[in-house]
């Protein structure tokens, strides 16, 4: 099924960033599987747009019924305007809880306060930092989220010339999120075809690192699709005992302080949900 996931990744890039290219021919059965994967990851808008673009470039590569399904989804889904920087600058006037660890939250809010009150305030840099942290949170909570990743990549391409990456690097060091930011950069390269030169907030990735992340991404896509399929076949087959979410510990080596704090918070939340 590797061809399915190669096409899935290509179509994400086509649909999210208006790029063009070709896909590998598949049977209609596999195309339907791909649409199910898109639904699983709430990425139907990206995939549908990508299918229509790929079909326009080469009608033989995609079955007509798959193209019609994609067109139907696009027609039925209302479009939303992109949020611009000037509309949400007021969000920085209040303290936010971005991390499970109190020390990291204090550092984050201090750097936001200092930046807002500096003589060379860069709202674009703060917005980019927020989008980075949003992606970190989704990774630590459940793994990659294609929508938040696409929003980060889109903002980087639209406003990258306004972002102060010297400040970004300083904030990344202060919050100790270097490894997680590198991981996000690797996802942007693998999923949306970014070049390493477009990502000044990460270290230049090695081929070995990208291969490892690519393999993990493929396993994740397959695993999530499989779990959804099983739940569709056997709905309601859930364990009544509330268990703590141990997912953050997979990233312990990336950020020990934050992952440990999340794990403790998850255990406390799990215990509080047990009916006495």
Image (cartoon, rainbow, N blue to C red):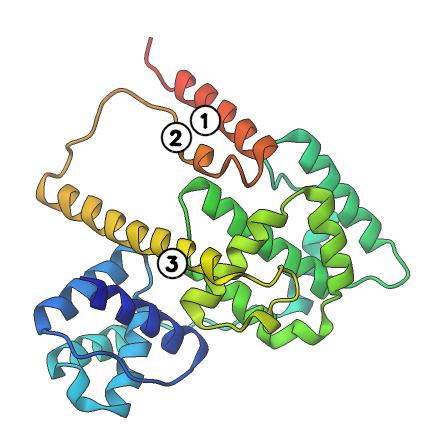
Q: Check disc 3 and report the residue beneath it.
A: 214
* Image location (x, y in percent) of residue 105: 68, 37
> What is the number of the mark on residue 266?
1
Decide: marks 1, 2 in contact (CB < 8 A)? yes
Element at badge 2? loop
Going from N to C along the chain, the mark reached first, 1 or 3, is 3
Going from N to C along the chain, the mark reached first, 1 or 2, is 2
Left or right of 203: which side holds 226?
Answer: left
Image quadrant holding the C terminus, namely top left
Image mark count: 3
Gap between marks 1 and 3, in whole Å? 28 Å
Neighbour tally class for label 1: few under 14, some 14-19, many 20 plus, Cα within 10 Å: some
Neighbour tally class for label 2: few under 14, some 14-19, many 20 plus, Cα within 10 Å: some
Element at badge 1? helix
* Image location (x, y in percent) of residue 196: 57, 69
Q: Check disc 2 and report the residue beneath it.
A: 245
Neighbour tally class for label 3: few under 14, some 14-19, many 20 plus, Cα within 10 Å: some
Residue at point 60%, 76% (across, down): 158
């Amino acid at each position: 099924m590797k061809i399915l996931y190669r096409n899935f990744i290509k179509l994400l890039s086509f649909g999210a960033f208006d790029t063009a290219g070709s896909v590998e021919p598949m049977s209609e059965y596999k195309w339907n599987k791909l649409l199910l994967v898109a639904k699983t990851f709430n990425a139907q808008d990206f995939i549908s747009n990508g299918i229509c673009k790929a079909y326009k470039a080469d009608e033989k590569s995609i079955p007509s019924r798959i193209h019609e399904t994609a067109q139907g989804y696009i027609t039925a889904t209302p479009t939303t305007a992109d949020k611009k920087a000037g509309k949400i600058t007021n969000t920085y006037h209040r303290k936010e809880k971005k991390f499970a660890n109190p020390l990291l939250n204090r550092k984050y809010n201090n750097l936001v306060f200092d930046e807002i009150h500096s003589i060379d305030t860069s709202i674009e840099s703060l917005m980019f930092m927020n989008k980075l942290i949003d992606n970190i949170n989704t990774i630590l909570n459940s793994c990659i989220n294609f929508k938040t990743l696409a929003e980060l990549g889109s903002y980087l391409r639209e406003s990258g010339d306004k972002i102060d990456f010297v400040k970004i690097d300083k904030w990344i060091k202060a919050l100790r999120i270097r490894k997680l930011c590198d991981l996000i950069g690797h996802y942007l390269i693998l999923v949306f075809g970014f070049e390493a030169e477009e990502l000044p907030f990460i270290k230049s990735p090695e081929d070995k690192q990208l291969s490892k992340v690519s393999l993990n991404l493929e396993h994740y896509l397959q695993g999530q699709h499989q779990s959804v399929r099983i739940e569709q076949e056997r709905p309601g087959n859930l364990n009544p005992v509330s268990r703590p979410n141990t997912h953050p510990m997979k990233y312990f080596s990336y950020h020990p302080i934050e992952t440990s704090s999340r794990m403790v918070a998850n255990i406390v939340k799990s215990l509080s949900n047990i009916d006495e």
